[in-house]
Amino acid sequence: MANTAQARKRARQSEKRRAHNDSQHSELRTAIKKVRKAIAAGDKAAAQATLDAQRSTIDSIGAKGVVHRNTTDRLKSRLQGAIKALA
């Protein structure tokens, strides 16, 4: 347990940041699942529309540093490739 006022404050801040980052991770996973579900349905136009709608969410999470920007870019690229493969 923290013994100083500074350490107690840092513990509070860390807990708050962790909770926020956890919710951001959850939002990212939900966005990815929505696109994958649209891809599984087999409708290319609907899947592309879903990816376009979720792209800003994915980008903002990467920009905030919750996950690395390259990770979000890789996810978007793979989803776009899966949509392209539907042909």
Image (cartoon, rainbow, N blue to C red):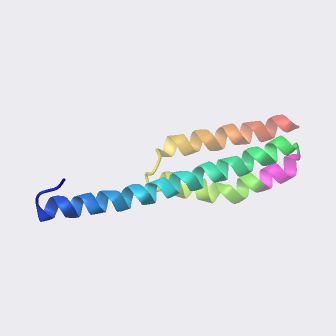
Would you place residue 12 above or below residue 69 in this image? below
Q: Quadrant of the C terminus?
A: top right
In the image, farthest residue toward the left? 4
Residue lying at 11% horizontally and 60% vertically, measured from the top left: 4
Residue range (magenta): 43-49
Question: Residue 79 location in percent, x, y?
Answer: 70, 41
Q: Is 5 displayed left or right of 77 in the figure?
A: left
Q: Is 53 displayed left or right of 47 in the figure?
A: left
Question: Residue 78 location in percent, x, y?
Answer: 67, 37
Residue lying at 85% horizontally and 37% vertically, measured from the top left: 86
Question: Residue 76 location in percent, x, y?
Answer: 64, 44
Main SS, magenta residues = helix
Q: Is 22 displayed left or right of 33 in the figure?
A: left
**Is residue 6 rendered magenta in the image?**
no
Residue lying at 59% horizontally and 38% vertically, measured from the top left: 74
Residue lying at 23% horizontally and 59% vertically, measured from the top left: 10
